[in-house]
Image: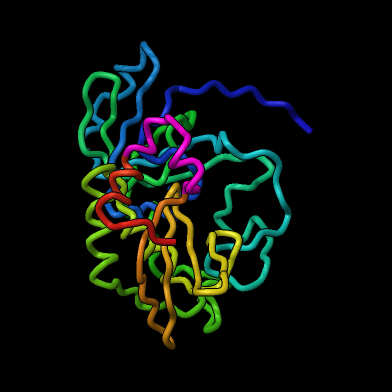
Amino acid sequence: MNVLTLQSIGVVRSSLDERASAARQPAASNGAEGTIELNDDLEDALSELASFDRIWVLFWFHLNAGWRPKVLPPRSERRRGVFATRSPHRPNPIGLSAVRLVSIEGLTLHVADLDILDGSPVFDIKPYVAYADAFPDASTGWLARPSDPISTYDVTFSALADAQLAFVREQTGFDLRARLIDVLSLGPTPHAYRRIKRDERSALIAAKEWRARFSTDHNVIQVDSIFSGYSPREHAESAAPELEIHRAFESRFGRTR
């Protein structure tokens, strides 16, 4: 096997700090914004790039360790060959994303529709050219089969959940509502990409440090309530600054589990 040496040309900066927080495609990112900070001496390389609406970003899945020849994609009920998927668990964990270019300031590219984690090394940037890069009539393989993707569920929210989600968004900037819709629309059952479990009361889903209880009626999933993912002991004993938001949340809505 040939050994190749690559050098990163910059790094992605975004609010996406864990793999579960990133959308699986740019179109599903709800317009998430961030920047690409390039290395020195690349300013001339950016000449005329600002005239393009979208750019291809080649980057490294820097949080991945190892790879798998078969993976379970989010929209599949069985394992597929990794080369037939967009899974980040690849022999060489190289990512490819078509993001929206908002503006360029010096060596900083402001982008949107971002699905790349914070700190990801960038290897290359290319302009997205619709007439060369888009093939609307191309086959979508197993994704076009009637049983795949799996049925889409409608996701609704109780009045309590609506108020709690608004509080989380206002206090932290984290759009937990969008995350829940994105994940639960794929179904209420546990999956490699869905942190779902059941207890004696109902079903639970985890998103970052928050938890949500939900119920299912046919193809409708209702999110009933939100609560902190930190344990009562952590709330009582930890001095971590991030718990202040969770204590304020419980002060307003009570301790729900």
Q: Does 183 sit above or below residue 238?
A: below
Report the quarter where the N terminus lies.
top right
Magenta-highlighted residues: 230-244
Image mark count: 0
Front-most of residues 237 and 95: 237
> In this view, which residue lies farthest toward the top?
41
Residue 46: x, y in percent?
A: 30, 24
Residue 58: x, y in percent?
A: 47, 37
**Colouring scheme, one of rainbow, by chain, secondary structure, one colour:** rainbow
Q: Residue at x 50, y 71 (%)?
A: 203
Location of residue 40 by image quarter: top left
Q: Residue at x 68, y 61 (%)?
A: 81
Q: Does 46 sit above or below residue 167?
A: above
* Magenta residue check for 242: yes
Q: Please say whether residue 15 is visible from this viewpoint.
A: yes
77 sits to left or right of 28: right
Report the quarter where the C terminus lies.
bottom left
Q: Does 239 sit above or below residue 184?
A: above
Q: Residue at x 32, y 51 (%)?
A: 250
> In this view, which residue lies farthest toward the right?
1
* Magenta residue check for 184: no
19 sits to left or right of 79: left
Q: Please say whether residue 27 is visible from this viewpoint.
A: no
Residue 98: x, y in percent?
A: 38, 47
Residue 79: x, y in percent?
A: 68, 66
Q: Residue at x 56, y 34 (%)?
A: 62
